[in-house]
Amino acid sequence: MKEKFMKLPNTEEWEEIANGFNTRANFPNCMGALDGKHIRIVNPQGSGSEYFNYKQFFSVVLLALVDSNYCFTAIDIGSYGKNSDSNIFRQSALHNLLVKGKLSIPNDQRLPDSEDDTPMPFVIVADEAFSMTQHVLRPYAKRNLTTQKILFNYRLSRARRFVECTFGLLANKWRVFHGAICLDSEFVVEVVQAACDLHNFVRVRDGFQFEDTLSCPLEDIPVLGTGGAPLTAKAIRDRFANYFTSPAGSVPWQFDMI
C-alpha cells in the first residue's frame, strides 16, 4: 500500500502536482506544501525530557509534504517533540534528496504568461518555522511590509492551507490522534505511518468531507530562529512577489484579502 499510495513523485508527477497548485491555489511552480505537527504520546520509559515540547506535553513530530489533493507526498515521523520544524526538515531524507539534487525536480520554468523570461525553480511552500532555500519559500517577516510583500504572504498562505487541511482530515478521520498514544516510540511511528498511508488510500477512493478540514487537534511546531535566507532564495521569493502583482500573476480578489 505504501508504494502505491505514497511514493516520491517522478519529474512528470511533480509537474502534475504543480499544475494542481496553480489551478487550485493560483501558485505556479509549486510542488508541495510543507509543515509539521505534534503527535501526542505517553512519555516513553527512560526517555527523560526528549519528547517534552513547548506546549508542555510529550510528543513526536509528523513532518509532511502534501499535494493540492490533500494527499501526503512525503512524511518524516518520530523526531523528538522538543525539536523545531526547521531542524527536523534539515535532518530528513526529503531534505537530503533535495540538497543532493535527487528528487527528480523538473527544470526551471518561466511563470505562466510572465513578461519576465527568467526560468523559475519549482518550490515548496512553508511557514516561517522553516529555513528558506532555492526550493523552499516562506513568508516575509511581518514587519515594515510593502503591499507587494503582504500580497505574496497571502498568496503563499493560500497554497500552504493544503497542508493544514490535510492534517485536519487525517486527525478527524483517525481518532487515535485525539489523545495521547500509549505505545513504545517505534510503534508510534508505525501507527502514524499506517494512518498516513490509509489517509491517501481513503482520499483517493472516497474524497473528503469539507468540514473535516476546518479543525485539527494536532499542535503546531514553534517558530525558532532559522537564520537569514541565502541571497539567491530571497531573489527567488522577490520574483514570485513581483509576479503576483503583475497583470500575468495577479488574481482579481487578492487586494480584498489584505
Image: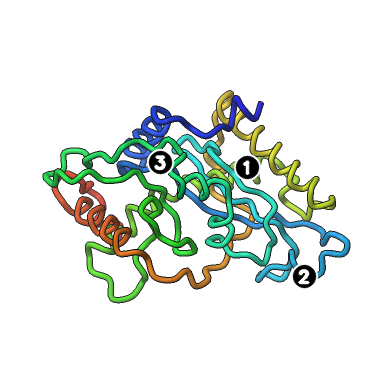
**Of the image marks 3 and 2, the number of the one nearer the N terminus:** 3
Q: Position of residue 206 (x, y in %)?
A: 58, 26
Q: Residues within 10 Å of mark 2 (few under 14, many from 20)?
A: some
| Circle number at residue 31 | 3
User: Which is nearer the eye, 165 or 195?
Assistant: 195
Query: Which label lies toward us, 1 or 3?
Result: 3
**In the rendered image, which quarter contains the C terminus?**
bottom left
**Of the image marks 2 and 1, the number of the one nearer the N terminus:** 2
Label pair 2/1, CB-CB below 8 angstroms: no
Q: Residue at x 32, y 41 (%)?
A: 29
Task: Give the Cα separation between the discs numbered 1 and 3.
Answer: 20 Å
Q: Quadrant of residue 37?
A: bottom right
Q: Position of residue 72 (x, y in %)?
A: 55, 39
| Circle number at residue 170 | 1
Label pair 3/2, CB-CB below 8 angstroms: no
Q: Residue at x 71, y 49 (%)?
A: 177
Query: Which label lies toward us, 2 or 1?
Result: 2
- Circle 2: residue type: Ser
What secondary structure is found at the residue carrying circle 3? strand
Q: Position of residue 64 (x, y in %)?
A: 56, 47
Task: Give the Cα separation between the discs numbered 3 and 2.
Answer: 36 Å
- Circle 1: residue type: Leu
**In the rendered image, which quarter contains the N terminus?**
top right
**Of the image marks 1 and 3, the number of the one nearer the N terminus:** 3
Name the image colouring. Answer: rainbow
Number of labels in the image equals 3
What secondary structure is found at the residue carrying circle 2? loop
User: Which is nearer the eye, 179 or 39?
Assistant: 39
Q: Quadrant of residue 112?
A: top left
**Please, which residue is most extreme toward the bottom here?**
144
Name the residue tied to disc 2. Answer: 49
